[in-house]
Image: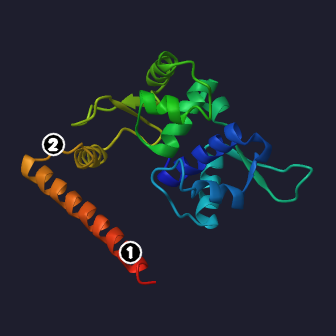
Amino acid sequence: MLNDVEIRVLGSLVEKQLTTPEYYPLTLHALTVACNQKNNRNPVTAYDENTVAQALETLREKSLSYVFHGSSSRVPKYKHVMPEVMHLSPPELAVMGVLMLRGPQTMGELRGNGSRFHEFSGLEEVEKTLNALISKEPEAMVVRLPRQPGQKDARFVHLLSGPPSPEFLKELETHSKVNQPRDEEPDGVKKLKQEIEGLREEFRVLQQQFEEFKKQFE
């Protein structure tokens, strides 16, 4: 099983290999920056280089990454070997990359967020890919989560860190409830908002009239 830092490091290596191959493999500094990006990341992290280096070492021990010494650079660079070790096809690698970097995703989110990694032909290909990861031998790599309150579609999560814990599922349910759309506002609140907006409009008119009045004496 992988810890959270290893997941982020591995996911970032996958992302950069697929989206910016001209800058891959990555130096330790570049990889640390990639891990701490604010876009396409959930959660956003603030790892230092030592933390990332430790994760790279444990990933190397697990045969998931290695140091690449290229002839054009004296600085060590790092690569992953997920497809070879885990026997992943390009669409499977894309789905795993999104799940590692963004957390639980619906099928539609996987298609949209994974489009930078792999051009899915449609939701059918995403579903086929998920089913392949769910039935992966010798162990499943993805699981479908129970549908949360207020959520139309079920979400999927990777199993590289083990099965989702009860605490994780509880936190997910709480987050879903907080983000549920609010019920329609009562008529009284609507009326009050309309009155406030009317007063604002009257104030704007009076302000304009006052400015025009001032101009008469300039």
Q: Residue type at mark 1? A: Glu
Q: Is residue 142 above or below residue 17?
A: above
Q: Can you give x and y, in whole percent of width and height, for residue 11 in the image?
A: 58, 44
Quick check: 160 left or right of 156? right
Q: Residue at x 56, y 63 (%)?
A: 47
Does residue 41 appear anywhere in the picture?
yes
Question: According to the image, label 2 marks what residue?
Answer: 184
172 and 133: which one is in front?
A: 172
Pick out the residue farthest to the right.
71
Whichever of labels 2 and 1 marks the residue nearer the N terminus, that label is 2
Q: Can you give x and y, in whole percent of width and height, for residue 114 in the image?
A: 55, 33
Q: Residue at x 34, y 40 (%)?
A: 164
Q: Can you give x and y, in whole percent of width and height, for residue 27 in the image?
A: 74, 56
Q: Residue at x 68, y 37 (%)?
A: 18
Q: Are marks 2 and 1 in contact (CB under 8 Å)?
A: no
Q: Residue type at mark 2? A: Glu
Does dot 2 land on a helix, a strand or a loop?
A: loop
Residue 182 lies in what quarter of the image?
top left
Quick check: 30 left or right of 149? right
Pick out the residue farthest to the front.
216
174 and 137: which one is in front?
A: 174
Looking at the rendered image, the disc whose residue lies closer to the viewer, 2 or 1, is 1
Quick check: 108 left or right of 113? left
Residue 140 lies in what quarter of the image?
top left
Does residue 1 appear anywhere in the picture?
no
Q: Residue at x 64, y 40 (%)?
A: 14
Q: Can you give x and y, in whole percent of width and height, for residue 57 in the image?
A: 64, 54
Does dot 1 land on a helix, a strand or a loop?
A: helix
Q: Answer few, some or many: residues within 10 Å of disc 2's Cα (few below 14, many 20 plus, some between 14 and 19).
A: few
Question: According to the image, label 1 marks what residue?
Answer: 211
